[in-house]
Image: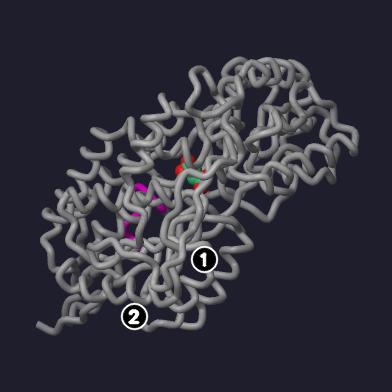
């Protein structure tokens, strides 16, 4: 990639707020800087939305709601299908844009665009499968009818770690269901969402159906919407503490919420597992997105008889992963999103080492510019170590050992989170016993990647509720109306 390519893709993105099908400046003319986390240099500035802008976006979403809900499902699906095709036709530019603002290597950005577009394709197909039920009243007197209707205008709040896919996973089902939306992307990565808004428009999405408010203050632009009786639904992907605050605001008017929150995924390797395969999958589960994912393996619980071999092999693989700017050839690990995140990862590693963990590889920051941290494997993690409890969101694999299946299950469940777990064993009976016992919404059985547009993504416990993707995903944006019929 040349500097000219980088400039071209950044220059091509509209920098305004997208409201009612038009690009406009913030009500007070303020802007928000966007930085490349590899160089810490400014890429550009986008509009810094205000409360007034947010209400204007909701006005636009409400004005467009009736016509969009009445648009034939096939037409809604075809707009989404064209968007899927445009995303894939422009994958190189979209990936470069994402790498510049978020840092992940180009190959990972391309994989994210493919994953993101898959949600759009999946929900283009689901748009025509919204149905209801007709049945006889059990008493025989009359009939029961149910119909599914769009829930109404939605607020979609998306994170920086997957700037496009976490958007399409909400936008796809909302639009397919016939809902209009206001999207608030993360302040670190607004460009990918602005580019997506342009593609949806090019694909034929009418003005006002999708509105995008970029802002340096999430609370400034979301609070007024929670106070507005026209907002009917909020979907959030982000941390558990922020999710709790949003839920408290949503509770004032009982707005329906979907919450895709933090994780603390256990990766459990039993003595009978295929260790080579477990290591391959551990690299994916840990290092996808540089570990900045809520489904990243956070804790490795490995049977004591194979822990040394597993840890050594994992360390060898992670040590061989080149770290650098995501645009450079051969780079497999980009920077963390910002200095705060990198310092948090460093503190967790220091805490573990202070409590006796061994550093098999990495364990430190890399370079003096950009938020880089070396891929790290720590062994001999003691109970009570912070990174067994905290979501790391970085390239650090912490290996603890267990002796019995019950011990492994207890350790895996010893967290307030319940998003995903990974289990490696060749014993089918053990596989299902452990699968049933783990307190998670998703489980990878001999697999380090669960994410799939056709599957219901989501957690239990403090990892949230609601499901994104799969046939379940569109249900979050539909309200069921029951009609009692007397024939
Ligand atoms: C996330 O990290 O929030 C989602 C990751 C995924 O969809 O795979």
Which residue is depicted at the point 29% across and 72% down?
152
Q: Position of residue 140 (x, y in %)?
A: 19, 77
Q: Is residue 202 magenta?
A: no
Front residue of 371/387: it is 371
Q: Which residues are magenta?
A: 468-476
Q: Residue 154 sits in which quadrant?
A: bottom left
Which residue is depicted at the point 37% across and 76% down?
55
Q: Is residue 211 left or right of residue 245?
A: left
The tag earlier along the polypeptide, 1 or 2, is 1
Q: Position of residue 239 (x, y in %)?
A: 59, 56
C-alpha distance separating marks 1 and 2: 19 Å
Most common SS among magenta residues: helix
Q: Is residue 334 left or right of residue 308?
A: left
Q: Is residue 411 left or right of residue 184?
A: right
User: What numbered label is drawn on residue 218?
Assistant: 1
Q: Position of residue 164 (x, y in %)?
A: 39, 46
Q: Is residue 474 magenta?
A: yes
Q: Is label 1 in a helix, a strand or a loop?
A: helix
Specify the color scheme: one colour
Label 2 crowd (10 A; few <14 / some 14-19 / many >=20): some
Which residue is depicted at the point 35% across and 59% down?
16
Please say if 194 is above or below 230.
Answer: above
Q: Is residue 484 left or right of residue 430?
A: left
Q: Which residue is the site of mark 2?
A: 230
Quadrant into which the C terminus falls = bottom left
Tell which tag, 1 or 2, sits nearer the viewer: 1
Q: Would residue 391 be seen by someone viewing this image from the given angle?
A: no
Q: Residue 354 sits in which quadrant?
A: top right
Q: Is label 2 in a helix, a strand or a loop?
A: loop
């Amino acid at each position: 990639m040349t500097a000219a390519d980088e400039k071209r893709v950044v220059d091509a993105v509209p920098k305004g707020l997208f409201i009612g099908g038009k690009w406009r400046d913030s009500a007070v003319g303020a802007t928000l800087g966007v930085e490349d986390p590899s160089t810490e240099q400014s890429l550009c500035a986008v509009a810094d939305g205000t409360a007034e802008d947010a209400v204007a976006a909701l006005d636009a979403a409400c004005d467009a709601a009736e016509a969009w809900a009445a648009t034939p499902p096939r037409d809604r699906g075809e707009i989404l299908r064209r968007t899927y095709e445009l995303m894939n036709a422009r994958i190189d530019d979209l990936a470069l844009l994402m790498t510049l603002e978020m840092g992940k290597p180009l190959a990972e950005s391309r994989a994210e665009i493919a994953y993101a577009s898959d949600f759009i394709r999946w929900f283009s197909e689901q748009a025509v499968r919204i149905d209801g039920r007709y049945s006889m009243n059990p008493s025989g007197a009359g009939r029961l009818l149910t119909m599914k209707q769009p829930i109404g205008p939605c607020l979609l709040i998306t994170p920086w770690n997957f700037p496009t896919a976490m958007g399409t996973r909400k936008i796809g089902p909302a639009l397919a269901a016939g809902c209009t939306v206001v999207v608030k992307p993360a302040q670190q990565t607004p460009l990918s969402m602005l580019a997506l808004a342009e593609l949806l428009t090019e694909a034929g999405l009418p003005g006002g159906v999708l509105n995008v408010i970029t802002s340096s203050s999430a609370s400034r632009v979301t609070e007024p919407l929670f106070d507005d009786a026209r907002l009917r639904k909020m979907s959030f992907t982000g941390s558990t503490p922020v999710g709790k605050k949003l839920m408290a605001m949503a509770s004032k008017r009982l707005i329906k919420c979907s919450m895709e929150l933090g994780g603390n995924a256990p990766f459990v390797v039993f003595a009978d597992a295929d260790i080579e395969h477990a290591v391959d999958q551990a690299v994916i589960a840990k290092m996808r997105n540089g570990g900045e994912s809520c489904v990243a393996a956070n804790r490795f619980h490995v049977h004591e008889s194979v822990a040394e071999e597993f840890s050594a092999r994992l360390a060898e693989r992670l040590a061989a992963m080149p770290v650098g700017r995501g645009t450079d050839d051969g780079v497999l690990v980009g920077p963390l999103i910002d200095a705060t995140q990198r310092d948090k990862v460093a503190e967790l590693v220091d805490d573990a080492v202070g409590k006796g963990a061994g550093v098999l590889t990495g364990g430190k920051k890399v370079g003096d510019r950009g938020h880089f941290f070396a891929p790290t494997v720590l062994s001999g993690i003691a109970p009570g170590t912070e990174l067994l409890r905290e979501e790391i969101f970085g390239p650090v694999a912490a290996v603890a050992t267990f002796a019995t299946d019950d011990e492994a299950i207890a350790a895996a469940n010893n967290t307030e989170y319940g998003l995903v777990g990974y289990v490696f064993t060749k014993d089918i009976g053990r596989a299902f016993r452990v699968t049933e016992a783990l307190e998670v919404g998703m489980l990878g059985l001999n697999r380090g990647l669960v994410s799939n547009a056709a599957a219901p993504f989501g957690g239990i416990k403090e990892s949230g509720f609601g499901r994104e993707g799969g046939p379940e995903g569109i249900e979050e944006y539909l309200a069921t109306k029951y009609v009692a019929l007397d024939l």
